[in-house]
Image: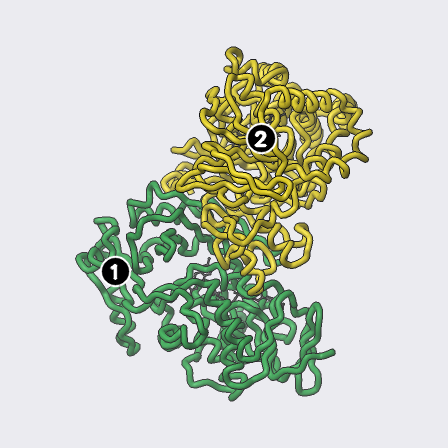
């Protein structure tokens, strides 16, 4: 029997679940197909950073709009998602780095945003007493923060289900076929028919795009994380660094969670990942450089996610170029957690109205087509 | 910066020592890495030192054999690096180990995992109270420091080890307040069909009967129980047990629990080797071929971490794995390997027939792996069995989801103390087999490591 719906969403990560929630809220019949279980991949295991700070100009508007949803995340999802707005700080260790921060703040102001500020040594020390004494200041967004990624993803999935969405775990999409004006989504166990299909398949989104004729250049990111034993509370904000690959925060449980984009390895086909300890050592060095008290902290666990990365590190959010009724939302390239709540709203707009008022210019597939055309034009001369 | 060897062996128990000695005899470069200060593993712990005194005498004839195993290893020319905890093994055969300050890397053309067994967790009410520990831990104290417990010591459980331990304690001049046998009465009946095969292992059976006889003569009060609890304020003060439908309570200062041993599969699981569920032994074990090869070419397994077979079988398995490794590295031809393997396979056939009998006789009682709601399942994160059941009600289909929901298995022990319990609870609650439910994904490092030590690792290798 074929299940009929208004929208079929492929992928039960935060982006798929958020799209499902927004669509269900607006009365649409939604089916989410998730090959494993909700939150199994990046969305469930990321660093949980809720960050508008230091985003690419193309994303700032969307990210800032997303903050409105985070502020009322409890109302939206029925769970506080362990979201705390303790701020995020990107630490500068030298005057040269602080000068870069000043340039960044000026640039963001010119774009019309006020959320990023420069802080100097004393303010940094006041907010982060444990910071290494040589640090000279940094970039801050005072109401950025962090949340529990797995809880957040589940909360979106559960609220979507409570509003009538059907979330099918253990159901992988294997083919997409045209059925008149509709799409027929063929799963491992069932068939689903809807006029609109959302591609939120994370690292596997390129396969889904290919099913409808969109070619995208996607790489696999395998960012690593590690966590220490519980430590007495010493830190509230989330810390990043101007000069080092680092994201650093203390969880509610007291454990310290360290990431920052050092890469392990991931195999998209087996969905297995491996830690690269030589690279992870880089994260350890960065953490100790900014927080000398971490030297003796005991690392108990490390892990690695599988995520899609585009060539320009910006997501693909918009309609398919090759086929009607397909909406893409993938390629979040290491910073899609904070964007989850708002991008679901964008997808709902596109599914229902075919357009959105939210700022997504420059995030569609057209940008690659334009680049490819330019590339070809340049190639003719040879 | 790493030293390269043909064979890097993790674990200096009978399996690892025999494998390294055999490999060295065949001209392979081999090193044994072990976290203990001395060779011998679980059974022959401190065997080189414990040559005199009542504790040594109590440890008996097995110890004499252990001395030979260790001496043969010492003579073989294989390298030995004690006091190093292995915290990561790569599928390539690289092994990373720590002395607590600094890490060293060994590059193995083959890596042999010979890390032995661990005691099956015994989640009963009160098992997290100070003064409650495994019989194995008690035995380690006896073997490594000759420590005999004082006060009211109760031994609870099933299997040969509690009997052996009590005999050793009596022989060393100690006292046991009482023994509570939790072996289900029906097991004897179920094991009977395996007895004829077991008779091929008469020496083992005799040893078992001798242990039972010694226990009877020792005058240690024996009880049979189907439920046991530890109680006390801040530490264990009483043991409660149900025998013939009535509860009894006794004063208790030290409560030693044991419900058998299971393969230590954390290393092979962290590497990513394929595992299977062993129905008879109720545990996971790596899938191995007859030469101890896993599904990952550079990773080999011998001894109890590949399936519980006992010390003598572990030794034979270790030698077989060394032969297989030598052949696969092109140092001997297959014909030589097979010829040298023949007496070892005969040796295995001598030690293995008793296993079905023992495994069935000492099969853990039902309910042990799926305890009542109030009992702590995960000690590190204080998660109860009831909380694990609750995750099933809200949609968790496996241990990894349960871990994400409530942090069970996320503590420093990496799920060593709760893994089988969490699998058991979910299997019971969902009506699936443990094989279908699976086990925690094991995340490195295998043992906690300081950030300082990890940071230095990168600097050494210049990356
Ligand atoms: C270690 C790490 C740390 C990070 N830290 C942060 C951070 O601090 N802040 C931040 O903003 N972002 C962070 N990110 C990025 C963020 O996690 C991701 O951008 C975001 O979770 C992407 O969500 P998603 O829903 O697109 O993808 P996913 O969560 O990967 O979901 C995709 C889902 O699709 C399913 N799927 C795939 N193919 C199919 C198919 N054919 N049929 C059915 N289902 C399918 C998959 O099983 C998967 O569950 C981090 C990422 C990692 C890996
Ligand atoms: C607690 C306990 C007590 C036992 N007592 C007896 C007994 O009294 N009599 C008897 O017949 N059998 C006993 N057994 C069973 C017996 O130990 C095994 O049959 C036999 O020792 C198996 O040998 P093996 O070489 O496989 O492993 P083991 O002898 O267990 O050797 C494994 C070695 O690996 C090392 N190791 C483990 N992990 C790491 C790591 N990450 N890094 C570095 N080194 C590591 C350990 O230190 C150990 O030395 C006991 C088992 C246990 C678990």
Q: x and y percent of residue A150 in the render?
A: 48, 62
Q: x and y percent of residue A4 in the render?
A: 66, 82
Q: Which chain is yellow?
A: B
Q: Quadrant of the C terminus of chain A?
A: bottom right
- Secondary structure under the numbered disc 1 in the rendered image: strand
Identify which residue, B290 or A91, lies in the foreground. B290
Task: Calculate the distance from the C-alpha at mark 1 to the C-alpha at mark 2.
Answer: 65 Å
Q: Are marks 1 and 2 on the same chain?
A: no
Q: x and y percent of residue B29 in the render?
A: 59, 24
- Secondary structure under the numbered disc 2 in the rendered image: strand
Mark 1 and ligand 1: say if the CB distance to the nearest ligand atom is below 8 Å.
Answer: no
Residue B179 numbered mark, or none: 2
Identify which residue, B171 or B457, lies in the foreground. B171
The chain under label 2 reads B
- Looking at this rendering, what residue extends furthest in the left direction? A122
Q: Quadrant of the N terminus of chain A?
A: bottom right
Residue B277 in sight from this viewpoint:
yes
User: Mark 1 or mark 2, which is nearer to you?
Assistant: 2
The chain under label 1 reads A
Identify which residue, A362 or A84, lies in the foreground. A84
Q: Which residue appears at 68% of the width and 79% of the height?
A: A3
Disc 1 marks which residue? A138
Mark 2 and ligand 2: say if the CB distance to the nearest ligand atom is below 8 Å.
Answer: no
Tell me the shade of chain A: green
Q: Which residue appears at 54% of the width and 49% of the height?
A: A274
Q: Which residue appears at 42% of the width and 38% of the height?
A: B235
Instruction: Please say if B149 is above or below A285.
Output: above
Q: Quadrant of residue A178?
A: bottom right
Q: Residues within 10 Å of mark 2 (few under 14, many from 20)?
A: many
């Amino acid at each position: 029997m074929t299940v009929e719906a208004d929208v079929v969403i492929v992928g039960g990560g935060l982006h798929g679940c958020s799209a499902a929630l927004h669509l269900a809220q607006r009365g649409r019949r939604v089916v989410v197909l998730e090959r494993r279980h909700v939150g199994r991949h990046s969305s469930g295991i990321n660093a949980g950073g809720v960050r508008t700070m230091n985003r690419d100009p193309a994303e700032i508007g969307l990210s800032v709009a997303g903050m409105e949803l985070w502020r009322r995340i409890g109302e939206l999802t029925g769970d506080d998602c362990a979201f705390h707005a303790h701020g995020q700080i990107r630490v500068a260790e030298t005057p040269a780095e602080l000068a870069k921060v000043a340039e960044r703040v000026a640039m963001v102001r010119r774009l019309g945003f006020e959320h990023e500020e420069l802080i100097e040594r004393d303010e940094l020390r006041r907010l982060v007493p444990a910071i290494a004494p040589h640090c000279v200041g940094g970039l801050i967004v005072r109401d950025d923060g962090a949340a529990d990624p797995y809880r957040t993803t589940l909360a979106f999935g559960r609220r979507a289900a409570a509003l009538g969405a059907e979330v099918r775990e253990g159901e992988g999409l294997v083919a997409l076929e045209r059925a008149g004006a509709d799409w027929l989504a063929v799963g491992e166990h069932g068939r689903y028919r809807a006029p609109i299909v959302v591609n939120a398949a994370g690292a596997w989104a390129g396969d889904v795009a290919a099913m409808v004729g969109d070619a995208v250049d996607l790489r696999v990111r395998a960012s690593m994380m590690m966590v220490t034993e519980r430590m007495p509370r010493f830190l509230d904000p989330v810390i990043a660094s101007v000069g080092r690959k680092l994201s650093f925060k203390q969880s509610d449980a007291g454990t310290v969670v360290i990431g920052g984009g050092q890469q392990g390895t991931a195999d998209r086909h087996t969905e297995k990942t491996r830690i690269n300890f030589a690279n992870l050592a880089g994260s350890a060095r960065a953490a100790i450089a900014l927080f000398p008290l971490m030297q003796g902290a005991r690392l108990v666990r490390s892990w690695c996610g599988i995520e899609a990365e585009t060539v320009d590190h910006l997501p693909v959010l918009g309609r398919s170029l090759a086929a009607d009724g397909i909406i893409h939302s993938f390629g979040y390239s290491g910073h899609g957690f904070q964007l989850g709540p708002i991008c679901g709203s964008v997808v709902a707009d596109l599914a229902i109205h075919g357009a959105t008022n939210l700022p997504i210019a420059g995030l569609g597939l057209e940008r690659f087509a334009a680049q490819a055309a330019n590339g070809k034009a340049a190639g003719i001369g040879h | 910066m790493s030293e390269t060897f043909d064979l890097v062996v993790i674990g200096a128990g009978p399996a690892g020592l025999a494998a390294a000695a055999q490999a060295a005899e065949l001209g392979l470069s081999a090193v044994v890495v072990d976290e203990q200060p001395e060779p011998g593993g679980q059974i022959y712990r401190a065997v080189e030192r414990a040559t005199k005194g009542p504790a040594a005498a109590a440890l008996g004839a097995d110890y004499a054999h252990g001395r030979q195993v260790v001496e043969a290893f010492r003579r073989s020319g294989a390298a030995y690096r004690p006091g190093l905890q292995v915290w990561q093994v790569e599928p390539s055969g690289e092994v990373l180990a720590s002395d607590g300050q600094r890490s060293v890397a060994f590059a193995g053309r083959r890596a042999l995992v010979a890390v032995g067994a661990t005691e099956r967790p015994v989640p009963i009410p009160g098992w997290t109270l100070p003064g409650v520990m495994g019989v194995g831990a008690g035995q380690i104290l006896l073997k490594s420091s000759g420590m005999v417990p004082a006060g009211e010591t109760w031994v609870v459980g099933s299997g040969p080890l509690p009997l052996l331990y009590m005999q050793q304690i009596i022989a060393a001049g100690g006292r046991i307040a009482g023994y509570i046998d939790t072996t289900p009465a029906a097991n004897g009946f179920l094991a009977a069909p395996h007895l004829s095969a077991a008779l091929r292992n008469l020496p083992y059976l005799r040893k078992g009967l001798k242990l039972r006889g010694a226990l009877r003569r020792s005058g240690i009060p024996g009880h049979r129980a189907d439920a046991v609890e530890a109680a006390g304020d801040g530490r264990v003060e009483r043991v409660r047990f149900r025998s013939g439908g009535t509860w009894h309570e006794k004063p208790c200062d030290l409560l030693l629990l044991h419900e058998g041993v299971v393969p230590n599969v954390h290393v092979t699981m962290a590497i990513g080797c394929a595992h299977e569920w062993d129905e008879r032994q109720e545990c996971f074990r790596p899938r191995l071929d007859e030469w101890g090869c896993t599904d990952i070419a550079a990773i080999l397994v011998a001894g109890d971490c590949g399936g519980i077979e006992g010390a003598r079988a572990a030794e034979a398995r270790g030698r077989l794995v060394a032969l297989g490794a030598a052949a696969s590295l092109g140092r001997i031809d297959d014909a030589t390997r097979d010829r040298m393997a023949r007496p070892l396979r005969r040796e295995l056939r001598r030690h293995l027939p008793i296993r079905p009998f023992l495994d069935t006789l000492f099969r853990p009682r039902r309910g042990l792996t799926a305890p009542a709601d109030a009992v702590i399942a995960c000690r590190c994160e204080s998660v109860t069995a009831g909380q694990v059941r609750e995750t099933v009600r809200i949609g968790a289909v496996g241990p990894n989801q349960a871990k994400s929901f409530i942090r069970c298995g996320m503590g420093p022990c990496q799920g060593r103390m709760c893994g089988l319990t969490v699998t058991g609870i979910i299997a019971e609650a969902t009506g699936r087999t443990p094989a279908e439910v699976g086990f925690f994904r094991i995340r490195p490092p295998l043992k906690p490591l300081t950030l300082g030590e990890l940071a230095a690792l990168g600097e050494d290798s210049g990356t």
